[in-house]
Amino acid sequence: MLKKKKQALTTRRNVTTAKIKRLVKKALDKGFKSKPAKGYKCLKDLELGSLFETQSGTRGVLISCDINAKVIVTDVKCDEESKGYY
């Protein structure tokens, strides 16, 4: 007869409601702060009307940057079929 393999024992910690509430409160207090990659800037850091270029070679002008950024794309590196999108 073949022996069954022993399943790996996993340790499971009991998480109480109080711990969950504490972790959620801590996460909401600190908030989420994202940083751009090295050598890049966020659109919110640029001045209105300034030119920018992305990593893929897309160039544009920043019009406004409230909740959503509004830009005018001036040049894009893509095939002719996709240029109508930009």
Image: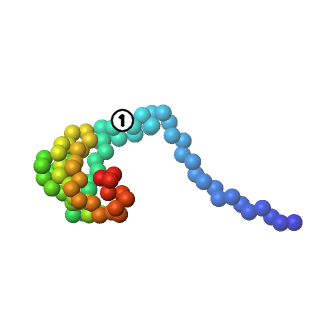
Residue 8 placed where, x, y %?
65, 59
Count of labels in the image: 1
Please state, as top left, top right, bottom left or bottom right, where the N terminus lies in the image. Answer: bottom right
Looking at the picture, the colour scheme in use is rainbow
Q: Is residue 62 above or below residue 23?
A: below
Residue at the right extreme, as displayed:
1
Q: Is residue 65 visible?
A: yes
Based on the displayed image, in which of its 4 quarters is residue 65 positioned? top left
| Corner quadrant of residue 19 | top left
Q: Position of residue 61 (x, y in %)?
A: 17, 52
Residue 54, relative to residue 72: is it above or below? below
Q: Residues within 10 Å of mark 1 (few under 14, many from 20)?
A: few
Q: Secondary structure at mark 1?
A: helix
Depth order, front residue of 26/71:
71
Q: Residue at x 17, y 45 (%)?
A: 63
Reading the image, the residue beneath label 1 is 25
Residue positioned 35% across, 63% down in the render: 79
Q: Quadrant of residue 10?
A: bottom right
Q: Amino acid at mark 1?
A: Lys
Please tell me which residue is depicted at 40% across the width and 39% down the height of the picture: 23
Asked if residue 55 can be seen in this view, the reply is: no
Q: What residue lies at 26% left-to-right and 41% top-to-bottom? A: 68
Instruction: Locate residue 72, reporting x and y percent.
Output: 21, 49
Q: Position of residue 24 (x, y in %)?
A: 39, 37
